[in-house]
Amino acid sequence: MSSRADLKERVRDFWEETPCGTRDIDVPEGSAEFFARLEQDRDRTQPFISRFARFDEQRGKRVLEVGVGPATDFVRFARAGARLTGVDFTEHAVRLARRRLELEGLEADLRIADAERLPFEDAAFDFVFSWGVVHHTESPDAAMREILRVTRPGGEVCVMVYHRRSLVALQSWVVNGVARGRPWRSFTDVIRDHHESPGTRAYTIAEARLLGRGLTQLRVTPVVTAFDVRVTRSRYAPRWAERLVPPRLGWFLVLEGRKP
């Protein structure tokens, strides 16, 4: 097996075992309470998502989410009345997403697919949304090309990736570099080897602009999150503490733009 294929399988295995955000949910998986807890956690740690996803503006639009996870954002597009399609790399996430839609009496097209090879025709969607997914792919550039390919001319794209010049990256370097007696390790190395699935990438703002180079009206917005002021894995500093962090040091970089 090639190293490329091996990395893909390792990434798939990681998220197949534990879909994003579900690790610390201690109620039965797939229950209404399980999904309610996921949504509460999302609102607590990332209350700004709706500012970028603009759920209420998507009614009647052809929307694709690349990397639905357990459907915490996906279900909000469905509630808003989008003509909705979603893909995920794992069967586990797609199964959870279908269960969530079923509980709320909602419908959408859900498929297992690789972000680097989306199973859709060119120009199929008005809005493509991908939150915290592209940086886990083996080839983020290939994933971005696919996102652009399936977006209609004039359509909108919103993609979030991790920020290398952030407090979270610094914390990771201290824990996985300095504390382990290896201070020479770069931020890139510790994020690749210790943050979520194998091979995770993080970008500078300039690199994020390069990733989004196919978009017009491109905006790259760094966003401070609860993760930047996390005390332990499950404990966070008060919300006001986030306001003390300069925006340029936020863990998330949000790319927004239009397909020419």
Image (cartoon, grey):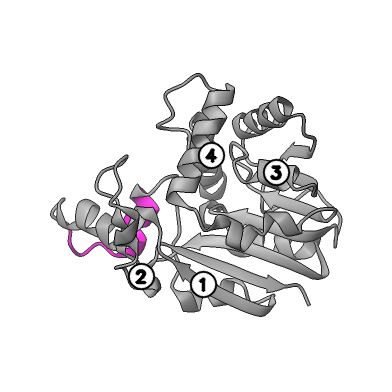
| Residue 249 tag number | 2
Residue extending furthest top? 28
Measured Cα–Cα span from mark 3 to mark 1:
25 Å
Q: Amino acid at mark 4?
A: Glu
The residue drawn where x is 37% and y is 54% is: 226
Measured Cα–Cα span from mark 3 to mark 4:
19 Å
Query: Disc 4 marks which residue?
Result: 39
Query: Disc 3 marks which residue?
Result: 87
Measured Cα–Cα span from mark 4 to mark 2:
26 Å
| Chain-order first, disc 2 or disc 3 | 3
Q: Amino acid at mark 1?
A: Thr
Q: Is residue 40 magenta?
A: no
Whether residue 62 is visible to the viewer of this picture, yes or no, is yes
Which quadrant holds the N terminus? top right
* Disc 3 versus disc 1: nearer the observer: 1
Measured Cα–Cα span from mark 4 to mark 1:
23 Å
Q: How many neighbours does mark 2 have within 10 angstroms: few (below 14), some (14-19), or many (20 or more)?
A: many
* Disc 4 versus disc 2: nearer the observer: 4
Residue 44, image x, y percentages: 44, 47
* Vertical placement of residue 47 versus 211, above or below: above
Query: Disc 1 marks which residue?
Result: 221
For numbered disc 1, what is the local secondary structure? Answer: strand
Residue 88, image x, y percentages: 65, 41
Do residues under tags 3 and 1 come within 8 Å of each other at their CB atoms? no
Q: Nearer the viewer, residue 58 or 119?
A: 58
Do residues under tags 1 and 2 come within 8 Å of each other at their CB atoms? no
For numbered disc 2, what is the local secondary structure? Answer: helix
* Disc 3 versus disc 4: nearer the observer: 4
Measured Cα–Cα span from mark 2 to mark 3:
30 Å
- Span highlighted in magenta in the image: 182-193
Measured Cα–Cα span from mark 1 to mark 2:
11 Å
Q: Amino acid at mark 3?
A: Val
